[in-house]
Image (spheres, rainbow, N blue to C red):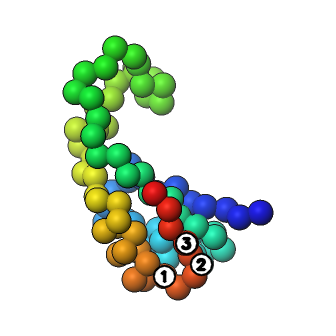
Amino acid sequence: MRFSYQIGMCISEHYLSLARAAEAAGYDGITIPDSICYPKTCSSKYPYNSDGSREFLEQVPFLESLIAVASMAAVTEKIRYAT
């Protein structure tokens, strides 16, 4: 069995330290979201906030996924990456 750590919706300055920590903890891979486009309005409620809001999209910068992977790969040795 292989285990992957999912990095996304976190402070971008943490990506490199999270990649190092995941590798040190024995994870086999890291997955990173690659969607940079979201609808401006949506009629459905977001299921992971108690009020259904999507305000997290306004405050969280999205890194281009392949640049983020290249950066994390530069500071790790064995861990694999996927978008």
**What is the three-letter code of the residue carrying label 2?**
Ala
Q: Name the one closer to the observer, 38 or 47.
A: 38
Horizontally, residue 42 falls left or right of residue 48, namely left
Q: Which one is earlier in the sequence, the residue at label 3 or at label 2?
A: 2
Which residue is identified by label 2?
24
Residue 30 position, x and y percent, is 53, 64
Q: Residues within 10 Å of mark 3 (few under 14, many from 20)?
A: some
Residue 25 position, x and y percent, is 63, 73
Q: Image height check: is 3 above or below 72?
A: above
Which residue is identified by label 1?
76
Q: CA distance from mark 1 to mark 2?
A: 9 Å
**What is the three-letter code of the residue carrying label 3?**
Arg
Q: Image height check: is 38 above or below 34?
A: above
Q: Nearer the viewer, mark 1 or mark 3?
A: 3
Q: CA distance from mark 3 to mark 2?
A: 13 Å
Whether residue 16 is visible here, answered yes or no, is: no
Q: Quadrant for residue 53, please give it.
A: top left
